[in-house]
Amino acid sequence: MIIKRLIVQNWRNFQHIDVQLSERQFIVGPHASGKSNLLDIFRFLREIAAGEGGFQKAVGARGGVSQIRCLSAGDDTDIALELHLAPNAAAAATWRYALGFCQVSPTLTHERVWHGDKLLLARPTAEDENTPERLTRSVLERNSDAAYRELTHFFQAITELQLSSKLRHFPDVIQEDTVERDANGQGVNGLLERIASVDEETRGSRLKTIEEGLILAVPQFAQLAFIRDSATGHPHLQARYSHWPPQAGWQREDRFSDGTLRLIGLLWALLESDSVLLLEEPEHSLNPEIVSQFAPLFFGMHTRIGGQVLVTTHSDVLMMEPGIDSSEVLMLAPTKTGTEVKAASDIDVVRRLLEEGLTAGEVVFSGNHPEHPERLGLLE
Ligand SMILES: Nc1ncnc2c1ncn2[C@@H]1O[C@H](COP(=O)(O)OP(=O)(O)O)[C@@H](O)[C@H]1O
Ligand SMILES: [Mg+2]
């Protein structure tokens, strides 16, 4: 299942968004245009669906409603999100979920669930009116609600590739269990735990695919293996390189390059599930030849099996693939009253250039450059 439409009111620097999303969606825009804020909407829903107290925690983690609400919100100051979910971008929505909330407590102003055309839930209900305290919680937090279980699971399954390079500079921290164990398995340790958590056969076959990828992408890379430390039992990855002498042995993941580690994380995330995958600027620490293969890779490894990739990027190389459709690109344009979001297919000049045979990478970044970047170098 994928998110095929997103409607937003007053979220961060967006007063209003109403866009269709495809299986593979690129999100581009200048610095501070709100790319991360846009992806954060999906993270927010995952946090709500994570369990008891989810809504309050998700709002709290963002510094409260006043931080989330768009600074240029109009008269209607509620924050509202609506998502339409479908098996693919061409299919009719199987689920619709809408949530509104405001400052008080913070409190839900509405929450609605549709399955197909059927409205299953419309809050506030009479019970909510009687016990207003109920409106501090979302129905997604209650895993017990069989009627919405598929919806809740969908939001819970939203994953994100976040290999913080900071962690990598403290290899002993990585190896010991002092590292925080994020429920969503972020960071290098989280990745190792996710790799460790699947059965041996699945792990073996995925790591084989990743090894093939690394052999193509990393010069001299020869072999990738999963092991558990004999003393601590902690999971590790190790690699061998073809130019090493035979006695050199294996190298553990704390010695991998940033790029190698990020590539392993990316490939694992693509293979791991058919859920929504959030990728923030996956081009980091990787050379352009590799990044240029990402667009077909997202398709071949993730969206083909029913998943969805939502990816922010500043990389024209990542968008060079001629197969990228103009509907697969969302363009963020800051205005005085907030950022506007449009599909490239809805912007005439962009669509025409793409139809003329230019690639998305050549077209969509032209308006994203700072006006006077050369002055940056003159600062003293
Ligand atoms: N509640 C809000 N209302 C308006 N703007 C906001 C709000 N919260 C954050 N922003 C703005 O969003 C911008 C950052 O967006 P971000 O998603 O990090 O950009 P990008 O990822 O495109 O670089 C900042 O300029 C910040 O001031
Ligand atoms: Mg960002």
Image (cartoon, rainbow, N blue to C red):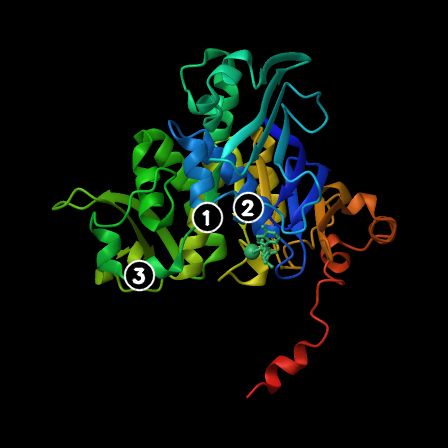
The amino acid type of the residue labelled 1 equals: Gly
Verify CB contact (< 8 Å) between mark 3 and mark 2: no
Depicted 365 relative to depicted 85: above or below: below
Please provide percent x and percent y for residue 216.
49, 53
Q: What is the spatial separation of the Cα atoms under label 1 and label 2, in whole angstroms?
A: 8 Å
Depicted 144 relative to depicted 371: above or below: above
Please state if 194 lies on the left or on the right of 83 as rendered: left
Q: What is the spatial separation of the Cα atoms under label 3 and label 2, in whole angstroms?
A: 39 Å
Q: Which mark is residue 68?
A: 2
Depicted 208 relative to depicted 139: above or below: below
Question: How dense is the environment of label 2, judged by Cα within 10 Å: few (below 14), some, or many (20 and up)?
Answer: some
Verify CB contact (< 8 Å) between mark 1 and mark 3: no
Question: How dense is the environment of label 3, judged by Cα within 10 Å: few (below 14), some, or many (20 and up)?
Answer: some
Identity of the residue drawn at 54% across and 63% down: 287
**Residue topped by disc 1:** 63
Identity of the residue drawn at 64% across and 18% down: 94
Choose the circle earlier in sequence order: 3 or 2. 2
Label 3 or label 2, whichever lies nearer to me, is 2
